[in-house]
Image (cartoon, rainbow, N blue to C red):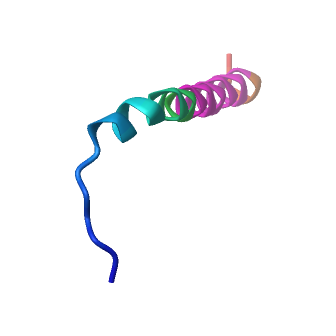
Amino acid sequence: MGDLVFNPMGFVEQLPRMGIGMLVIFVVIGMIILTTMLINWLFSDK
């Protein structure tokens, strides 16, 4: 079993990767919201 070592610089080095991940999550959520709005607009009874 590997040793757990606290490495604060490891967190700082991974910040760009975490930022990209958060950006992708927000883009996907935005696409889901826009798709839902489009479907509601197309199939709503006016």
Q: Is residue 31 above or below residue 8?
A: above
Which residue shows up at 54% across the image and 34% down it? 17
Q: Per the image, is 20 magenta?
A: no
Residue projecting furthest to the right: 42
Instruction: State the image coordinates of residue 31 (x, y, percent, origin top left).
Output: 66, 28
Q: Quadrant of residue 44?
A: top right
Q: Is residue 36 magenta?
A: yes
User: Which residue appears at 69% of the width and 29% of the height?
Assistant: 35
Is the residue 44 above or below the residue 18 in the image? above
Q: Considering only vertical position in the picture, is 4 above or below 8?
A: below
- The image quadrant where one finds the C terminus is top right
- Left or right: 15 with respect to 4? right
| Residue range corresponding to the magenta coloring | 23-41
Q: Main secondary structure of the magenta part?
A: helix
Viewer-closest of 31 and 1 = 1
Q: Position of residue 33 (x, y in %)?
A: 58, 27
**Left or right of 31 on screen, residue 10:** left
24 or 28: nearer the viewer: 24
Q: For this rendering, which residue is in front, 32 or 26?
A: 26
Quarter placement of the N terminus: bottom left
Looking at the picture, how far across and down is residue 3, in whole percent? Answer: 28, 71
The answer to whether residue 24 is left or right of residue 16 is right
Image check: 6 left or right of 9? left
Which residue appears farthest toward the bottom when viewing the image?
A: 1
